[in-house]
Image: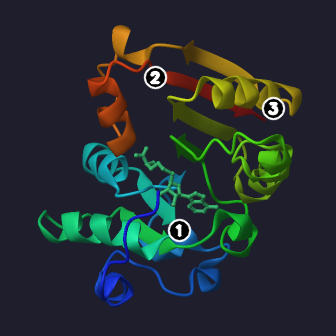
């Protein structure tokens, strides 16, 4: 998602109590950043943070980290957080997931991929967040059990992800190809999801697990 340049976005992000500058310094010790041993869930490409903020409010016993590479997008999450009660279990990173291993080492319990860029062209397949290249990266950041929860409107990206995760050894569970016409009591919506749901576009969802 590219938004038009927001003036002073970076400045505003850096002032936020949720923002972690130089996250490489916390490699291997994110539990100390949160001052507890609770599980850590990471959302890659968190966008404006709707999902992550609601999840952090709903599950205070889980630590949430959001990673987003554009300051013009992340600043929207920072602005939302200014208007609500302080969340002790949330941190935000302005970072490119291609450099994930510089920030986390054996400490993430679950990764959320919500409406990731599908990179439809074959020559860009490596950039998909479920490509083998990325799955290898995730191996090093997960603590023990590996869990990837994915939602997307894009059917081709969904089929690609199912195949890529399975062939990498993930067990796929709770697959839905039309999430909003099934039981979604527990579902927390993202910005894209709300937009697509309104248009009647079916939402795909899966959970992937590996030891
Ligand atoms: N999760 C949000 C936004 C989805 S759009 C939602 O569901 O509404 C995908 C987001 O991923 C964009 O904001 C984009 O900037 C971000 N993104 C794409 N590649 C990324 C990468 N390599 N590292 C970090 N963020 C990335």
Q: Which residue is mark 3?
A: 164
Q: Residue at x 61, y 23 (%)?
A: 155
Query: Label 1's element?
Result: helix
Q: Which mark's residue is nearer the viewer, 1 or 3?
A: 3
Quarter of the image with the C terminus is top right
Q: Is residue 163 above or below residue 128?
A: above
CB atoms of marks 1 and 2 within 8 Å: no
Q: Which residue is mark 2?
A: 203
Chain-order first, disc 1 or disc 3: 1
Task: Assess disc 2: are there few (<14), some (14-19) or many (≥20) residues with their C-alpha within 10 Å of its C-alpha.
Answer: many
Q: Which mark's residue is nearer the viewer, 1 or 2?
A: 2
Residue 131, image x, y percentages: 79, 44
Residue 183 as seen in the image, left or right of residue 28? left
Task: Assess disc 1: are there few (<14), some (14-19) or many (≥20) residues with their C-alpha within 10 Å of its C-alpha.
Answer: some
What is the CA distance from the residue labelled 1 to the residue labelled 2? 33 Å
Q: Is residue 101 above or below residue 45?
A: below
What is the CA distance from the residue labelled 3 to the residue labelled 2? 19 Å
Query: Label 3's element?
Result: helix
Residue 41, image x, y percentages: 51, 51
Q: Is residue 98 above or below residue 139?
A: below
Along the line of sight, the residue nearer the viewer: 113 or 155: 155
Is residue 40 among the parts visible in the rendering?
yes
Which mark is on residue 172?
none
Q: Which residue is mark 1?
A: 31
Q: How is the image coloured?
A: rainbow
Can you tell which quarter of the image residue 112 is in? Answer: top right
């Amino acid at each position: 998602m590219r938004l038009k340049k927001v003036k002073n976005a970076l400045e505003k992000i850096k002032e936020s109590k949720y923002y972690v500058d130089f996250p490489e310094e916390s490699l291997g010790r994110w539990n100390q950043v949160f001052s507890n041993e609770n599980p850590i869930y990471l959302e890659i490409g968190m966008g404006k943070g709707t999902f992550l903020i609601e999840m952090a409010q709903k599950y205070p016993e889980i630590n949430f980290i959001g990673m987003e590479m554009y300051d013009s997008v992340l600043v929207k999450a920072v602005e939302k957080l200014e208007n609500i009660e302080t969340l002790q279990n949330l941190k935000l990173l302005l970072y490119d997931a291609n450099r994930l291993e510089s920030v986390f080492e054996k400490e993430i319990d679950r990764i959320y991929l919500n409406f990731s860029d599908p990179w439809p062209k074959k020559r860009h397949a490596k950039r998909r967040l479920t490509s083998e290249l990325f799955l290898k990266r995730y191996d090093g950041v997960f603590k023990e059990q590996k869990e990837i929860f994915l939602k997307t409107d894009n059917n081709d990206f969904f089929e690609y992800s199912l195949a890529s995760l399975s062939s990498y050894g993930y067990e796929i569970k709770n697959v839905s190809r039309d999430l909003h016409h099934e039981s979604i009591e527990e579902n927390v919506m993202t910005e894209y999801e709300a937009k697509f749901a309104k248009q009647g576009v079916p939402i795909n969802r899966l959970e992937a697990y590996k030891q």
